[in-house]
Image (cartoon, rainbow, N blue to C red):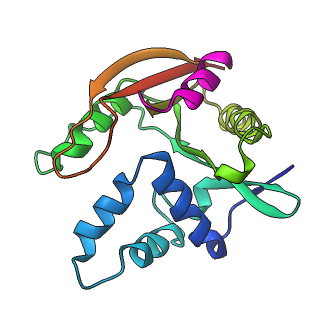
Amino acid sequence: MQIREARAADAEHLVRFINMAADDLPLHFWRKSVGPEDDPWAYGRERAARDTGNFSYGNAWLAEVDGKVAACLLGYPAETEPSPIDPDTPPIFVPLLELEALAPGAWYLNVLATYDSFRGRGCGSALLAEAEAIARRLGHRTISLIAEDTHQDALRLYRAKGYREIARRPVVKGDWQVDAREWILFVKDL
């Protein structure tokens, strides 16, 4: 397995991983952003191919197995002093922003996802170790992540690697179809 920095040309993989990690919430948002006439995946790819922004390829690393993209890590520094949540924020995102604010100054691991055909090969563990190394290199003392209560394999991995649960918030579904009931914030001291 090889871990490398993502490139703009990896946008197609990045949007798949970003969407996979949050059970179609990104796709749901992209559809609302572009409307029924435009391609939400194209919108996601444009965002992932940007040089700036949290969901930029510049904040992503890919694990390759036998030369094929297998898994993704996307993360960035959390705000040291979180801003108040904008009253115009769609309610579906408010619980996530509330949880992020509970780990100020952490390195925030936003996406950790593996294609089904590569599961069970250690990609998640390797990318978690990479995330921790990146966080340390950037001077962060903690790393945080948010997971859904239905992602049992991921929850087991995080707990096994020393991440501790800090808080939970209910998932606001609106017209987003998802089985999850709660978002869970995990933190690990580095």
Q: Where is residue 176 in the image (x, y as percent from the top left)?
A: 24, 51
Name the residue located 42 percent from the left edge and 25 percent from the top edge: 185
Q: In this view, does 26 lie above or below 10?
A: above
Name the residue located 26 percent from the left edge and 44 percent from the top edge: 93
Magenta stretch secondary structure, dominant: helix
In the rendered structure, the answer to whether residue 89 lies left or right of residue 54 reads left
Q: How many marks?
A: 0
Q: Which of 64 and 119 is in front in this view?
A: 119
Q: Position of residue 53 (x, y in %)?
A: 45, 60
* Residue located farthest toward the bottom when viewing the structure as drawn: 37
In the rendered structure, the answer to whether residue 77 lies left or right of residue 6 reads left
Q: Quadrant of the C terminus?
A: top right
Does residue 82 appear anywhere in the picture?
yes
Q: Is residue 48 above or below residue 169?
A: below
Name the residue located 50 percent from the left edge and 52 percent from the top edge: 20
Is residue 58 found inside the magenta-colored segment of the image? no
Q: Where is residue 100 in the image (x, y as percent from the top left)?
A: 38, 32
Is residue 152 found inside the magenta-colored segment of the image? yes
* Residue located farthest toward the left when viewing the structure as drawn: 87
Q: Is residue 9 above or below residue 190?
A: below
Q: Where is residue 137 in the image (x, y as percent from the top left)?
A: 72, 36
Q: Nearer the viewer, residue 7 or 168?
A: 168
Give the image quarter of residue 96.
top left
Give the image quarter of residue 67.
bottom right
Does residue 141 appear anywhere in the picture?
no
Q: Which of 36 and 140 is in front in this view?
A: 36
Magenta range = 149-160
